């Protein structure tokens, strides 16, 4: 159980969010208050019964596929050092952008838990095949908090190697470099969230924010390539989205064939097979097989003819 969820029931949380309703992309919103039993603000939340709270009417994600993020923006890393987004992109790896705030009582913890679990199930690791940027959307959160959350998610896992081994130490070092936990000021946060179309709104009477549940895939040069929605992320979808963001520069031949045969379906928020492409590959494979078979028959007959004439 991760840090965010030590005292909260996941099933209860998800049920509350489902009752509050979904956005145009079937996203869930972070609407939890630090004081959920305080009913004095409830009248300000709803204009009419059975309607979404007024302050989140315009909150959602306006997809900005093909748009390049402002790479000159500067944020603080978990160790307190400043870093430009351009510096994080210099690795040449695709990036998963995870917008959250570290003291979010509910939704952000569910999203980052879902991302963490999906990453743990991949054969790839941050810092090698891809990178992750977790950025706080709350300008009051500082690097010391980011450092604590980073340690919670990175330092206590095996990452596919036995704890205490040299391989484990090397992998932890690699993941530490590849997964950045950032904080920043309001202007920088606004610039990035606006560029990727990530809507945010403070929740009246609380210190919390309403926002969508999604992660954003970026190409190695900072182009938005895909949005994956929800609280859980299938490893296949995440792997395919990373391949797509990398423009095919990582992965083996099988990975590239899978990426060719699947495309993102916005209705199901997942990658689905494309019949036409699969049939094309099947036809090509059939032609290759027939070519090999006919070549084999020709070669055999040729050898028979040669032996008879001799």
Image (spheres, rainbow, N blue to C red):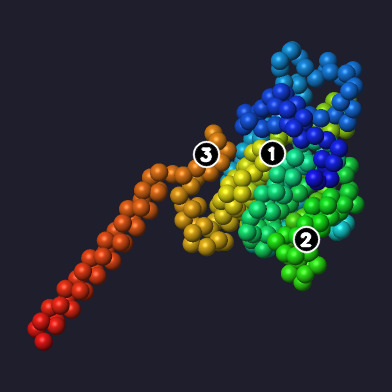
The residue identified by callout 2 is 176
Question: CB under 8 Å between callouts 3 and 1?
Answer: no
Pick the quarter of the image with the C terminus.
Answer: bottom left
Q: CA distance from mark 3 to mark 1?
A: 17 Å
Residue 197: image x %, image y %?
67, 38
Pick the quarter of the image with the N terminus.
Answer: top right
Crowding at dot 3, Cα within 10 Å, few <14 / some 14-19 / many 20+, comes out as few
Tell me the number on the disc at residue 265: 3
Q: CA distance from mark 2 to mark 1?
A: 23 Å
First of labels 3, 1 by sequence position: 1
First of labels 3, 2 by sequence position: 2
The residue identified by callout 1 is 231
Mark yes or no: residue 156 visible: yes
Q: Nearer the viewer, mark 2 or mark 1?
A: 1
Residue drawn at x 15%, y 77% as measured from the top left: 304
Q: Is residue 109 left or right of residue 197?
A: right
Residue 185: image x %, image y %?
84, 45
Give SS at disc 1: loop
């Amino acid at each position: 159980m991760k840090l965010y969820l030590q005292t909260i029931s996941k099933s209860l949380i998800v049920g509350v969010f489902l009752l509050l309703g979904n956005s145009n992309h079937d996203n869930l919103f972070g609407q939890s208050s630090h004081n959920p039993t305080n009913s004095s603000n409830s009248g300000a939340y709803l204009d009419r019964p059975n309607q979404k709270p007024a302050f989140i009417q315009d909150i959602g994600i306006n997809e900005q596929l093909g748009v390049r993020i402002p790479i000159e923006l500067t944020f603080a890393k978990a160790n307190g050092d400043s870093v430009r987004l351009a510096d994080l992109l210099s690795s040449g790896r695709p990036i998963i952008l995870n917008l959250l705030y570290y003291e979010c009582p509910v939704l952000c913890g569910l999203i980052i838990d879902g991302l963490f679990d999906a990453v743990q199930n991949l054969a790839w690791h941050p810092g090698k095949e891809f990178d992750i940027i977790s950025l706080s959307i709350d300008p009051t959160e500082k690097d010391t908090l980011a450092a604590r959350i980073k340690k919670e998610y990175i330092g206590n896992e095996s990452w596919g190697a036995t704890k205490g081994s040299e391989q484990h130490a090397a992998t932890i070092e690699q993941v530490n470099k590849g997964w950045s936990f950032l904080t920043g000021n309001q202007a920088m946060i606004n610039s990035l969230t606006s560029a990727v179309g990530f809507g945010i709104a403070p929740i009246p009477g609380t210190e919390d924010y309403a926002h969508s549940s999604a992660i954003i895939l970026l190409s190695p040069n900072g182009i938005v390539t895909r949005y994956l929605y929800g609280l859980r992320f299938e490893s296949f979808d995440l792997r395919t989205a990373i391949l797509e963001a990398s423009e095919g520069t990582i992965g083996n031949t099988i990975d590239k064939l899978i990426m060719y045969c699947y495309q993102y379906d916005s209705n199901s928020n997942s990658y689905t097979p494309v019949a036409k492409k699969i049939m094309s590959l099947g036809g090509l494979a059939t032609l290759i097989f027939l070519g090999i078979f006919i070549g084999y028959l020709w070669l055999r007959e040729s050898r028979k003819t040669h032996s008879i004439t001799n």
